[in-house]
Image (spheres, grey):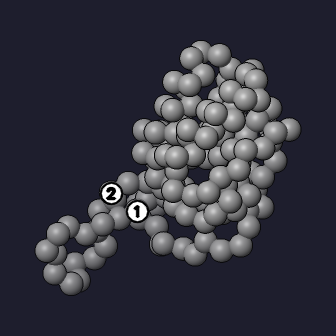
Amino acid sequence: MLLPNKIKHKKWFKGVSKGNETRGTKMNFGTFGLKSMGTKWITSRQIEASRRTIIRYLRRGGKLWIRIFPDKPITRKGAETPMGGGKGGVEFYVFPIKPGRILFEIEGISEEQAKEAFRKASTKLPIATKFIKR
C-alpha cells in the first residue's frame, strides 16, 4: 500500500473539498488516462486495488503512472471511548479527489486494452471516472 514515510504534522483537519481541480488535470506521461468526475476521499487501499487490477490486465505490456498519492491522515477514536481525551490515532491515509484530476496514465498498449483496463480499475474506486486520451 501507499503510505507516506514522513509527514510534517501527524494529524490533519478534515478540510472541505469543493470546486474543480486546478492541478493534475493535464496528461503528462502516458497516452491514455483515467480522469475523476466527482469529489471523494480515495484511500491507499483503493488506489492499490486499482493499480493491481490494471497491472494484472496489462501482463507486462505497457507502462503505468499513478498520479495521486495518499498523504492525508484520517484518525479514528477507539470503540466505547468517552467524550474528550483528544483526537484519535491515525487509521489510514487518503487523497482528496476533486473533479478533473488525472488518477492513472497508461502508455504502450492499444486504446481498447486501455479502456478495458481502466473500466476494471474504476470499479474499485468510489467515484465516477472518465477515459481520456492525449
Tag 1: Cα neighbours inside 10 Å, few (<14), some, or many (≥20)? some
Q: Is residue 118 above or below residue 36?
A: above
Tag 2: Cα neighbours inside 10 Å, few (<14), some, or many (≥20)? few
Q: Is residue 31 above or below residue 16?
A: above
Q: Position of residue 22 (x, y in %)?
A: 78, 61
Q: Position of residue 32 (x, y in %)?
A: 76, 35
Residue nearer the viewer, 75 or 133: 133
- Residue 55 in view in this figure: yes
Residue linked to disc 1: 74
Q: Residue at x 80, y 32 (%)?
A: 31
Q: Earlier in the sequence, mark 2 or mark 1?
A: 1
Going by the numbered disc 1, the residue's amino acid type is: Ile
Q: Position of residue 45 (x, y in %)?
A: 42, 45
Residue linked to disc 2: 91
Rounded to the nearest angstrom, the CA distance separating label 2 from label 1 is: 6 Å
Q: Position of residue 61 (x, y in %)?
A: 65, 16
Q: Residue at x 52, y 39 (%)?
A: 50
Q: Residue furthest right?
A: 134
**Quadrant position of residue 29:** top right
Going by the numbered disc 2, the residue's amino acid type is: Glu
User: Going by the image, does 107 lie left or right of 123?
Assistant: right
SS for callout 1 = strand
Report the quarter where the N terminus lies.
top left
Q: Residue at x 33, y 57 (%)?
A: 91
Report the quarter where the C terminus lies.
top right
User: Going by the image, does 110 lie left or right of 97?
Assistant: right
Q: Answer yes or no: do the residues labelled 2 and 1 have beta carbons within 8 Å?
A: yes
Q: Residue at x 21, y 84 (%)?
A: 83
